[in-house]
């Protein structure tokens, strides 16, 4: 069975532009994780697209 790569190792293998996009996406997710105790996922989706 092949050993799974750690996330950090996978990220290191990405080209610089994709690492930047991934960092931006992770920051976006962190912002919304602060609201998970206040809103359901459906409510958050509606707020995003308003």
Image (cartoon, grey):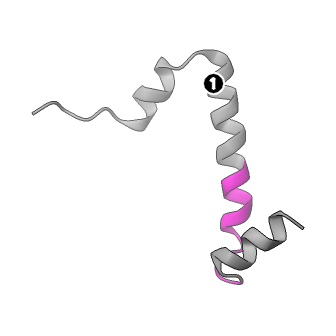
Q: Nearer the viewer, residue 47 or 22?
A: 47
Residue 24 lies, in percent from the top left, at 72, 39
Residue 45 lies, in percent from the top left, at 73, 69
Question: Which quadrant holds the N terminus?
Answer: top left
- Which residue: 31% across, 32% down? 5
Question: Which quadrant holds the C terminus?
Answer: bottom right
Asked where in the image residue 16 lies, by quadrant, the reply is top right
Q: Which residues are magenta?
A: 28-38
Asked where in the image residue 46 lies, by quadrant, the reply is bottom right
Residue 33 lies, in percent from the top left, at 66, 66
Q: Nearer the viewer, residue 48 or 21?
A: 48
The answer to whether 38 is drawn above or below residue 49 in the figure is below
- Which residue: 35% across, 35% down? 6
- Which residue: 83% across, 71% down? 47
Residue on which disc 1 sits: 18
The answer to whether 20 is drawn above or below residue 36 in the figure is above
Q: Is residue 4 left or right of residue 29?
A: left
Q: Is residue 4 left or right of residue 16?
A: left
Tell which residue pokes out farthest to the right in this image: 50
29 magenta-colored: yes
């Amino acid at each position: 069975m092949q050993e799974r790569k750690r996330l950090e190792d996978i990220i290191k293998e990405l080209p610089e532009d994709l690492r930047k996009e991934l960092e931006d996406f992770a920051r976006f997710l962190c912002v919304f994780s602060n609201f998970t105790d206040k809103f359901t996922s459906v409510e958050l989706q509606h707020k995003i697209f308003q």
